[in-house]
Amino acid sequence: MDDETLNLYDDDDDDYLSGNDMMDPSEDGHDSVQDDSTNAAGNRVRRRRKRRHSKCWKHFEIVGDKLPDGTTKVICKHCEYSYFIDLSNGTNTLLRHSRVCSKNPGSTPRSRKFDMMVFREMIAGAIVEHDLAYSFVEFRRIREAFEYANPGIEFWCRNTAVSDVRKIYENEKAALRKVLSEVPGRICFTTDLWRAITVEGYLCLTAHYVDNWKLKAKILSFCAFPPPHTGYSIAMKVMELVKEWGLEKKVFTVTVDNASSNDNMQGVLKTQLRRALVCNGEFLHVRCAAHILNLIVQDGLAVISDALEKIRESVKFVKSSESREQMFQTCVETVGSKKEAGLVLDVATRWNSTFKMLSRALPLREALRNLSEVDPSYKCFPSELEWSRGALICKFLAPFAEMTNLVSGSSYPTANLYFMQVWKIECWLRANETSDDETICQMVETMKLKFDKYWEDYSDILSIAAVLDPRLKFACLEYCYDTLDPLTSKAKVDHIRKKIKKLYGVYKKDPNSTTASPSEATLVNSIPAGYGDFYAFFSQNAGTGKSALDVYLAEPVLDMAAFKTLDVLRYWKNNATRFKELSRMACDVLSIPITTVSSESSFSAGSRVLSKYRSRLLPSNVQALICGRNWLRGFEVTSDSDEEEEEEEKEGEEKEGEEESGRKKRSK
């Protein structure tokens, strides 16, 4: 029994009483000494109840009336612990409890036993999550803070911190391995290569899957990958990692960029995994949509780079020094322009930075004009024709930027978005083929060649993903194909119809598809008694001879306006008992990532872990830090402001390098 419940009538414990509590009549522990007294004539006169002044009543409340044995039930307002106490004997027990109650904000809880191993594990978790150096545990000020918090602490060195991080990595890996082994569906992968600042090559392998009807993405490996980086070498490394995780029988698709080595890699993987792949690997290879989009736009921008030269030089002029930025800010205030965001200079390898540069410079056109009037050194102000062309190019690039942002998400399905977005880009290119501006026509012509190279024939598996969106189905494909070319529309739709039936046949034959999912089992158990047979008749559509796929396609398309924010996976979760194996197929298809953004985002984390100030980390430690961080925190969403800071930091480093090289030349 708790010590607090044993000595309920002890009012001599001076250790728990202040001077006011002991002697001050206004805070007397005997709050309800006697409610009744007898006068000299023997008549009972009811006395008025005394007000309760003890500090404990801020934290306790009385429940009910006094019990026959003279005790009263009292409950703590914070932790709801109850006492049965005779209040005529004082409130010392309640005062003691209010001082040590763990949920009372003003209490002083009893000291907890300090566990050194738990503390070390917490610090190792902080090192992983916050990109701290292993030597963090050896910092003098950190050790002083630790010692102040607990004088009996035992300090440890950086090598022990490395061991603690490795332990977290191994524990989290074992937990993730168990989760992946229990995933009922198949798993999609993305992979990409990265060169670190140390010139070492790294390979990242990421798994994408649906668990409990939620889309998940986890980095499986971020390992050193020395040359040669041929298709065969990449395929063998991916196979090694997939087998290490025990997932060789669960591979569905592999999304990669358009490097020629990746085409060879896909061929080797098909040969190695043919028996375990769906439809003998027909749908294995998925090309990164963001990478193709980048190639298309880069080809177009190469044609019109000269048309934007003066706008680019204007931004560079303003960004070249702090004094010019201050002068430009004065010009913005003078003309009354709304400056929602500052100017940003584009990067040659990132076309969306060119779009961002134009979208920010165009609203500040009058401020730049004012700058040209007050600063004689500013001589690159664009002409009216150049401004109008810049506005036209910005408008032209807007749908490409929109598509890039939309398909680059990792927390929601993107496979069902592919078909409509690619169709919109093709329609946009066709509409601008006859533009009045000759420069735009040249740009479109170049981009159309690259588009036809990769997207003349839309991806079969990603077209199937559009059909599995209840707002689109085959009605969307028929409309899009008919808009582009009515003569070939029917043949293309029939081709996708044939492919989806072939894929559905594989899932229907799969014995695992007959196993009820957790949500399905829950729904079956929730059927009222006596209605089981009727439910089986209804759910199986008895007597019609239709498959789940036929039933789904026969139902009307959901209204896009009413279901604009529809969670497609939730739809299939709610209809899992009706469509059974079709819902399982939809889960796998909708989990396909159409970009390698998740793998590339790990390279951003890698550049922070393996920087020029921390370039001697072993590859095994790099993997433990990056994978551990991903397993603990998930993928991080990089905002535009973060990208701008990185760009500015790179520009600063480049300037420092130029200044340093200049000093060396002068010293020579």
Image: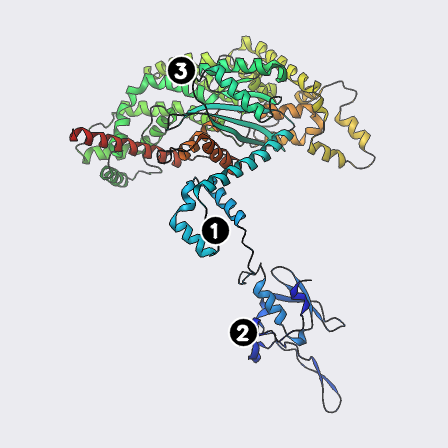
Mark 2 lies on a secondary structure that is loop
Provide the residue designation for mark 3.
447
User: Residue at position x 50%, y 30% from top?
Assistant: 409
User: Residue at position x 59%, y 35% from top?
Assistant: 175
Mark 3 lies on a secondary structure that is helix
Pick the front one: 624 or 496: 624
Provide the residue designation for mark 2.
18
Pick the front one: 252 or 226: 226
Quadrant housing the C terminus: top left
Across and down, in percent, residue 62 comes to 66, 67
Provide the residue designation for mark 1.
154
Instruction: Tell me which label, 2 or 3, sits earlier in the chain.
Output: 2
Q: Nearer the viewer, mark 3 or mark 1?
A: 1
Residue 401: quarter of image: top left
Across and down, in percent, residue 216 comes to 56, 31
Tell me how far mark 2 sits from mark 3, CA to CA. 84 Å
Tell me how far mark 1 sits from mark 2, CA to CA. 37 Å
Establish if 155 lies above or below 573.
Answer: below
- Left/right of residue 182 with respect to residue 631 in the rendered view: right
User: Residue at position x 51%, y 24% from top?
Assistant: 190
Residue type for callout 3: Met
Instruction: Tell me which label, 1 or 2, sits earlier in the chain.
Output: 2
Residue type for callout 2: Ser
Across and down, in percent, residue 488 comes to 55, 9
